[in-house]
């Protein structure tokens, strides 16, 4: 490949970068601030230094145009809510009194005021805070954050591009505020919102912005003609502004589809497209509209969501095709790099042979720079990089680490009967009720109990050799004893062992399955200050030995009440890992399902009568386009059933899902054929219970009555009111009482108080039921 004149202006850029710092400095500063150990000034100073360092790293790596505004203390959608002045009325006093405390009150709530609802950011593992809007919403511009961060970058001598959530996506992500009719459409507020964006753009132009990026990922989803018309109007009006920077409209995560002609015709100067998730579709669509003459095209050819190295030659070929389709082609990652860890150089325990297959944020930045250089100067300028890349790709393709013939043979031999329970639900339910003897409105929790400082210290001491295995296991036994004792005294009906031995609900299992790699420093933001280390799925999956039987059995030995066995389901094991990209996801899911089937069988054989296989990621992994969903749901639900269908009829199978929109997968929830499902419902005011009822869901369900992502303690009356709402949709014979999610991130004082109130609420409402 040789340089072409059209590529002469090619530049390297990214849309966003990991926020936390190499040692999660931001998390520590924010949580220190919440606990009163860090002042507001110290918190802001830490954040400013992280922003400065991130920008300098990008510039030193060769990124020509660095993003600003992508940094956040909690969530970039919440930042947009602040930017447009859409603060809910219940939070306005807190925001007016102290902007920082008010911001965190919207995110986390207070004892007096509930937080904003939280849900998944498209089909990623990141959570955003849902804007609450209504007919009376008044938008006002506050560009302070964006202008401040742009000026910081300019003061460093860098070329910078502010990144904002676009107005159409912001409104499409929003929900009607409490008290507003459910059929209210936030998109009807577009004409009210656009002048606020115009004001922010003018402020950024005045501060020195040449370009501003407006992210519109909602346009890669199926959109109605009215929604596409709204996008056309939004960018016609913003493009017609005279006092503005040049506009780059970015989409990612899938094909742009019918929205591409809309944006191609809009009076904006640039469009950014994802050429990893939907390369062929976006290429075809771009050619069909005649390209982008006179416009800038930012080509996302490096996958911003996975950790495998880029195929540089393939990406260069894509870029070469794009050269004739735009006035200028720049090179980027496909989306913000906040979805991947920071740096592979921090990983000292991964086999060097495997490490060369991996690419985290810093390595992806280098790939973007290399591709831009190859586009401008030709492949001769990057000969060494191309050779090293080819060798690494070949090493992975040929490695025995990636293939286990026995695992593949077993997966291929699975029959339909192995994915079906031996009896229909009605017969199983009768057997389970007789066996378990539970009351109406039985109470339980989702699985985990608080991961205390003492538990984390014990794990660290074990890794460092300060205590031996025997000492560590005694600490785990003590914790399980305390958890069981508390639940019995509180009156919970179905107990859990609390999972004190588990570092993470995916990583714990990944460390015991073949084919997975664990990182030491591969932290990725899930929400707020919650960071996880997704394991890396590098090869075929099997289970060498039981993973959970010992501690579940120990907990059961301490109580006459049933103790749930707790497992993470196959879809979630994939969704919350970095999956291999060299075979279909459904094939990998079946391998994981068979490993879990073995574990379920061992738990049942050890006397466990209730087994929960969590699938919180079933909804978040749902393809963004409706046309792609049936195939996904077919293998996803089959994988769950393979995991759980080998048990006796009187063994009760539970599953759990949280913080997603469930309405469009109710049929799939039914197809799981679990006996009981628990779901998030507290922040959404039992919406999921109504959705289940509308579908005619026939099994038992526990819509949550305790929002565990907030430190506030719900009163017994509040929980009882939610239960009464749930009973309007789900009969008492089928309704369970539980929190929204696991209690790992909560402290013991709030956990005790909240669960005591939950049990009190269940008893109160149970007493209100008509006598049978």
Image (spheres, grey):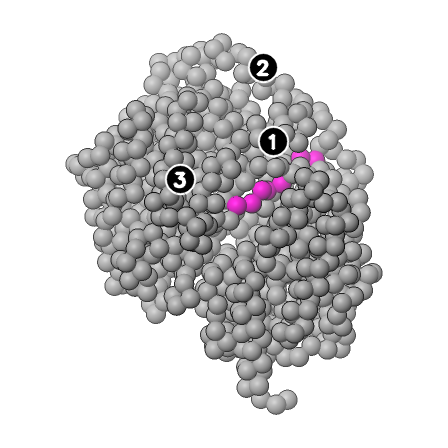
Q: Residue at x 54, y 60 (%)?
A: 747
Dominant SS of magenta comes to strand
Q: Is residue 310 above or below residue 602?
A: above
Mark nearer the viewer, 2 or 3: 3
Residue 527 in the image, given as x and y percentages of width and height: 48, 49
Q: Residue at x 61, y 35 (%)?
A: 581
Looking at the image, tell me whether mark 2 or mark 3 is earlier in sequence order: 3
Q: Which residues are magenta?
A: 531-539
- The residue beneath circle 2 is 387
- The residue beneath circle 3 is 46
Left or right of residue 474, residue 14 in this image: left
Between residues 248 and 498, which one lies in front from this camera angle?
498
Q: Residue at x 43, y 50 (%)?
A: 37
Looking at the image, tell me whether mark 2 or mark 1 is earlier in sequence order: 1
The answer for how far apart the CA atoms under marks 3 and 1 are is 25 Å
Q: Could one spot residue 119 in this view of the protein?
A: yes
Q: Could one spot residue 675 in this view of the protein?
A: no
- The residue beneath circle 1 is 347
Q: Secondary structure at mark 3?
A: helix
**Do the numbered discs 2 and 1 sit on residues whose CB atoms are within 8 Å?**
no
């Amino acid at each position: 490949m040789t340089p072409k004149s059209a590529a002469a202006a090619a530049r390297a850029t990214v849309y966003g970068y990991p926020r936390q710092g190499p040692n999660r400095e931001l998390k520590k500063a924010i949580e220190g601030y919440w606990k009163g150990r860090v002042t507001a000034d110290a918190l802001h100073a830490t954040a400013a230094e992280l922003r400065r360092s991130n920008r300098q790293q990008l510039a030193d790596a060769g990124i020509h145009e660095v993003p600003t505004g992508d940094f956040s203390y909690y969530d970039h959608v919440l930042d947009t809510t602040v930017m447009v002045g859409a603060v809910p009325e219940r939070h306005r006093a807190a925001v007016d009194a102290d902007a920082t405390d008010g911001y965190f009150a919207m995110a986390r709530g207070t004892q007096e005021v509930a937080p904003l609802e939280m849900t998944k950011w498209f089909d990623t593992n990141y959570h955003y805070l849902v804007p609450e809007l209504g007919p009376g919403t008044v938008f006002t511009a506050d560009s302070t954050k964006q202008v401040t961060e742009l000026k910081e970058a300019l003061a460093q001598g860098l070329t910078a591009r502010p990144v904002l959530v676009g107005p159409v996506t912001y409104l499409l992500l929003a929900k009607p505020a409490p008290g507003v009719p459910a059929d209210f459409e936030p998109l009807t507020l577009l004409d009210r919102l656009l002048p606020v964006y115009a004001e922010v753009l003018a402020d950024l132009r005045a501060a020195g912005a040449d370009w501003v990026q407006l992210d519109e990922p909602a346009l890669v989803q199926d959109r109605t003609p009215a929604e596409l018309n709204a996008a056309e109007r939004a960018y016609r009006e913003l493009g017609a502004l005279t006092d503005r920077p040049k506009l780059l409209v970015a989409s990612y995560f899938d094909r742009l589809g019918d929205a591409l002609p809309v944006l191609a015709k809009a009076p904006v100067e640039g469009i950014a497209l994802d050429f990893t998730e939907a390369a062929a579709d976006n290429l075809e669509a771009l050619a069909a509209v005649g390209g982008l003459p006179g416009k800038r095209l930012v080509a996302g050819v490096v996958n911003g969501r996975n950790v495998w190295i880029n195929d540089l030659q393939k990406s260069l070929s894509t870029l070469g095709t794009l050269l004739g389709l735009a006035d200028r082609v720049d090179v980027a990652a496909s989306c913000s790099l906040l979805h991947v860890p920071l740096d592979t150089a921090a990983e000292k325990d991964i086999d060097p042979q495997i490490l060369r297959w991996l690419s985290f944020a810093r390595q992806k930045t280098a790939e973007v720079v290399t591709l831009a250089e190859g586009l401008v100067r030709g492949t001769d300028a990057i000969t060494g990089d191309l050779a090293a890349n080819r060798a690494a790709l070949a090493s992975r393709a040929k490695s025995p680490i990636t293939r286990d013939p026995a695992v593949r043979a077993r997966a291929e031999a699975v029959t339909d009967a192995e994915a079906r329970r031996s009896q229909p639900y009605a017969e199983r339910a009768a057997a389970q009720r007789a066996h378990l003897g539970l009351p109406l409105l039985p109470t339980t929790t989702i699985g985990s109990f608080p991961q205390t400082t003492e538990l984390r210290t014990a794990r660290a001491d074990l890794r460092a050799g300060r205590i031996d295995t025997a000492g560590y296991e005694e600490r785990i036994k003590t914790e399980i004893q305390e958890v069981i004792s508390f639940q019995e005294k509180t009156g919970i009906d179905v107990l859990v062992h609390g999972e004190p031995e588990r570092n993470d609900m995916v990583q714990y299992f990944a460390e015991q399955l073949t084919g997975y790699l664990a990182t030491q420093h591969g932290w990725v933001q899930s929400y707020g200050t919650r960071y996880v280390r997704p394991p890396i799925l590098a090869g075929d999956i099997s289970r060498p030995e039981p993973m959970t039987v010992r501690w579940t059995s120990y907990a059961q030995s301490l109580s006459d009440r049933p103790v749930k066995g707790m497992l993470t389901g196959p879809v979630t094991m994939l969704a919350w890992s970095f999956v291999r990209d060299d075979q279909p996801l459904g094939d990998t899911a079946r391998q994981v399902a068979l490993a879990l089937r073995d574990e379920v069988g061992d738990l049942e054989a050890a006397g466990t009568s209730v087994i929960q296989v969590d699938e919180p990621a079933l909804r978040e992994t749902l393809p963004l386009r409706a046309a792609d969903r049936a195939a996904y749901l077919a293998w996803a639900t089959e994988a769950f059933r393979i995991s759980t269908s080998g048990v006796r009829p009187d063994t009760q199978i539970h599953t759990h899902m949280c913080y997603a929109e469930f309405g469009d997968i109710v049929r799939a929830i039914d197809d799981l054929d679990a006996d009981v499902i628990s779901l998030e419902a507290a922040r959404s005011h039992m919406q999921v219970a109504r959705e289940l009822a509308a579908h005619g869901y026939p099994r038992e369900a526990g819509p949550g009555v305790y929002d565990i992502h907030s430190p506030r303690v719900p009163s017994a009356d509040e929980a009882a009111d939610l239960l009464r709402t749930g009973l309007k949709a789900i009969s008492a014979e089928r309704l369970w009482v539980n929190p929204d999610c696991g209690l790992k991130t909560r402290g013991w004082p709030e956990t005790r108080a909240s669960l005591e109130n939950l049990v009190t609420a269940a008893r109160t409402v149970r007493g209100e039921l008509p006598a049978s």
